[in-house]
Image (cartoon, rainbow, N blue to C red):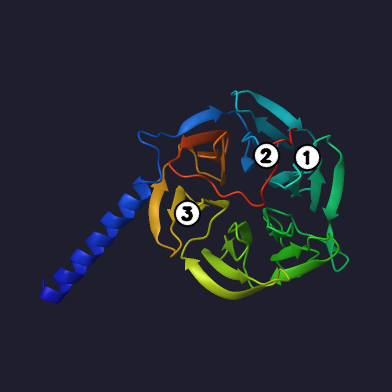
Amino acid sequence: MSAKQFMMALIALAAIVISSAQGANLLAPGAEVTKLAGDFKFTEGPAADAQGNIFFTDIPNNHILKWSLDGTLSTSRENSGGANGLYFDKDGNLLVCEGGGRRLVSIAPDNQVKILADKYEDKPFNSLNDLWIDPEGGIYFTDPRYGDRDNMDQDGEHVYYLTPCRCKIRRVIDDMVRPNGVIGTPNGKRLYVTDNGGGKTFVYTIEKDGTLSGKKLFCQAGADGMTIDVKGNVYLTTDVVAIYNRKGEKIEAIQVPERPANVTFGGPDRKTLFITARTSLYSIEMNVKGARTPAQPASKKR
């Protein structure tokens, strides 16, 4: 080995050690992945309400479920329209990507349902998958198609933005193979979108009107769901929960007994990471809080 090769090897080793240390600081001391509930068909779309309770979906069973802070499991909604991704807005409404219903809906605390979006240019969506709400109340959502792609009404699998006034839908990404997970920064300046079909994740600059610019490769990994913590680390669900820092460097990998599909922070202090993984719901205690966008008043209950 030459002197140059030796130095390069040392640099690479140092980078691994630094990344491992950064990742270790994210997990609570002695933290282990814990199974909370099981016997589902395919869990997805976890979202925390203002109190930290977790709502998630069991897509084949057509249910939205609730895991309460006291450790009880209940059914929040039956006949969910094939609900996939979930997200709470600032008023405590649960926004739902209905993959089967091919629409975005809002469920109020009193269970009243309002359709927010079901078409683009008078054509039905493919199968809405995941969403994120920006600080102004605008909604980014992905619209892939898993399964039969020969009979789609849309001309591809894209990403859309519903304006805060709920009066206009813009197509903001049209060059992905199969977009899936989406998450933004709390300041509303950056949006991360994973192209699960293309095997890559990208980051964009969010403009004032909600459009996107400055597309950059974030990491060479496609994923299903994703979330973000207050330090700006991005969590991707692949065969593990892979954690990347702001530079797109992988700093931690959380092993889960089943392949994870999606992930979010919840609990009373928002320092518990909840993971939906095939037939089960899991959690692990963290040393960092999840980022909340938009802010929710703690008084809202369901």
**Label 1 vs 2, first from the N-terminus:** 2
Q: Left or right: 28 with respect to 168?
A: left
> At x 44% / y 52%, what residue is drawn?
243
Q: What's the residue type where badge 1 is placed?
A: Ser
* Residue at image mark 1: 80
> Which mark sits nearer the N-terminus, 1 or 3?
1
Q: CA distance from mark 1 to mark 3?
A: 34 Å
Would you identify the image quadrant in which residue 37 lies?
top right
Q: Above or below — where is 298 with respect to 229?
A: above
Q: Which residue in the protein does label 2 denote?
A: 57
Q: Amino acid at mark 2?
A: Thr
Q: Label 1: few (<14), some or many (≥20) within 10 Å? A: many
Split into 4 quadrants, where in the image is the C terminus? top right
Question: What residue lies at 86% left-to-right and 50% top-to-bottom?
Answer: 115
Residue depicted at x 63% and y 23%: 72
Q: Earlier in the sequence, mark 3 or mark 2?
A: 2
- Say what amino acid the circle numbered 3 marks: Lys
What is the C-alpha distance between the residues marked 1 and 2? Answer: 9 Å
Q: Nearer the viewer, mark 1 or mark 3?
A: 3
Q: Where 154 sits versus 34, above or below? A: below
Q: Which of the numbered marks, if any, corresponds to residue 231?
A: 3
The image shows residue 25 at horizontal and vertical percentages of 36, 46
Report helix, strand or loop for mark 3.
loop
Q: Are marks 1 and 3 in contact (CB under 8 Å)?
A: no
Please name whichever residue, 249 or 151, is drawn nearer the observer in this view of the structure.
249
Q: Is residue 74 above or below residue 178?
A: above
Q: Camera-side residue: 119 or 296?
A: 296
User: Does the CB distance between marks 1 and 2 fall below 8 Å?
Assistant: yes
State how far apart marks 3 and 2 are (Cα): 27 Å
The quadrant the N terminus occupies is bottom left
